[in-house]
Image (spheres, rainbow, N blue to C red):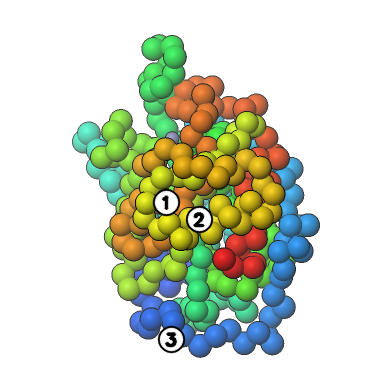
């Protein structure tokens, strides 16, 4: 163990979020006492919407891209991990790394999912969640090491910048973390930034962090979850993702219905393609998860997935929906 890993381990051990990463809450969520509402002023969707800044979210998208492409094993990947960890620590004391190793083509990758927890009334000292419902909000923070869909064959071994595919979902969640600190949500929220989503040439070596997370949940399970991926496209189109729909129709329909009620035009009331993404390993272990993803993105897995293809407005549209679900429920 080198010095850096030791420091990270110490940070990890000092964090109140140990309950997420390595302990199993020993009782069923439904049986846990409700939070004492008198102890905490819970925020509202209106307050949260007023606090959310599309410009700040976009600045966090830009900041990630300033590190350069962020594939596992690169210096930019390590720097980004530290940045994300420290950024989340501004908004909650419950931040932790979930480290994992993965060997592919004889090379061992050191990956980390990054977790942040927001509990009404503050972190639970006992390690047990104090609310009856947990909403998981997810995105992937790594970027693809190869631009294998680039129109120019000479670029296809080049790492992508991942402004949309990677940075956009993370940017929304970082800004939401700031909002959650200002206006505590009425339910337990766990943000998870998955590593190793976009690594391999085939699906066998992709979704590495989410598969590990799903395998290591133990008895604890979020009640439901939302994955944000490729949500920054200027030309945002969000049809219903078919794997989400096929696994949990009622839940998925409720989310798109909420988008319609809120008048969020990019959410289209039609079924789109089935996408393999980080939600699938979680669906497989029984968590209703929807993937909010714009797969109609011409720069997907090309070196042209850059900041100029994204817009603050798109991040805001998606955040508006998430805020509604976080504060008002479904
Ligand atoms: Zn990708």
Is residue 266 shown left or right of residue 54? left
Dot 3 and dot 2 residues touching (CB under 8 Å): no
Q: CA distance from mark 3 to mark 2?
A: 28 Å
Say whether disc 3 or disc 2 marks the residue closer to the N-terminus. Answer: 3
Name the residue: 78% across, 57% down: 50
Name the residue: 74% across, 49% down: 53
Q: Is residue 224 above or below residue 78?
A: below
Residue at label 3? Answer: 31
Q: CA distance from mark 3 to mark 1?
A: 29 Å
Image location (x, y in percent) of residue 173: 59, 52
Q: Quadrant of the N terminus?
A: bottom left
Say whether disc 1 or disc 2 marks the residue closer to the N-terminus. Answer: 1
Residue at label 1? Answer: 245
Is residue 104 shown left or right of residue 228? left
Disc 3: CA contacts within 10 A as few (<14), some (14-19) or many (>=20): few
Is residue 155 shown left or right of residue 237? left
Say whether disc 3 or disc 1 marks the residue closer to the N-terminus. Answer: 3
Instruction: Name the disc covering residue 273, or none.
Output: none
Name the residue: 58% across, 84% down: 35
Ligand 1, image quadrant it occupies: top left
Q: Of all residues shown, which one is farthest toward the left?
A: 106
Residue at label 2? Answer: 253
Is residue 205 shown left or right of residue 326? left
Q: Of all residues shown, which one is farthest toward the front?
A: 270
Name the residue: 56% across, 52% down: 256
Image location (x, y in percent) of residue 211: 32, 52
Image location (x, y in percent) of residue 235: 62, 31
Q: Which secondary structure, mark 3? A: helix
Q: Which secondary structure, mark 2? A: helix
């Amino acid at each position: 163990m080198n010095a850096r890993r030791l420091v990270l381990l110490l940070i990890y051990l000092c964090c109140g979020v140990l309950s997420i990463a390595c302990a199993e809450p020993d009782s069923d969520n439904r049986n846990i006492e409700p939070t004492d509402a008198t102890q905490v002023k819970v925020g509202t969707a209106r307050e949260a919407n007023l606090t959310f800044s599309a410009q700040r979210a976009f600045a966090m998208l830009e900041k990630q891209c300033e590190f350069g492409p962020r594939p596992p094993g690169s210096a930019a990947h390590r720097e980004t991990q530290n940045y994300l960890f420290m950024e989340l620590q501004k908004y909650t004391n419950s931040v932790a790394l979930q480290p994992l190793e993965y060997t592919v083509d004889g090379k061992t990758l050191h990956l980390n999912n990054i977790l942040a927890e927001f509990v009404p009334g503050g972190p639970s000292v006992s390690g047990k969640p104090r609310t009856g419902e947990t909403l998981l909000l997810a995105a992937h923070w790594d970027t693809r090491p190869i631009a294998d869909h680039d129109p120019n064959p000479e670029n296809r071994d080049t790492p992508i910048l991942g402004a949309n595919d990677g940075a956009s979902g993370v940017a929304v969640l970082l800004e939401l973390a700031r909002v959650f600190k200002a206006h505590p949500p009425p339910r337990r929220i766990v943000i998870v930034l998955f590593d190793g989503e976009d690594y391999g040439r085939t699906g066998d070596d992709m979704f590495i962090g989410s598969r590990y997370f799903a395998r290591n949940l133990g008895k604890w399970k979020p009640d439901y979850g939302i994955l944000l991926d490729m949500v920054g496209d200027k030309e945002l189109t969000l049809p219903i993702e078919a794997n989400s729909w096929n696994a949990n129709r009622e839940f998925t329909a409720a989310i798109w219905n909420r988008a319609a009620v809120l008048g969020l035009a990019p959410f289209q009331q039609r079924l789109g393609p089935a996408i393999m993404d980080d939600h699938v390993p979680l669906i497989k272990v029984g968590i209703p998860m929807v993937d909010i993803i714009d797969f109609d993105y011409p720069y997907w897995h090309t070196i042209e997935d850059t900041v100029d293809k994204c817009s603050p407005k798109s991040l805001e549209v998606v955040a508006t929906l998430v805020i509604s679900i976080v504060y008002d429920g479904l």
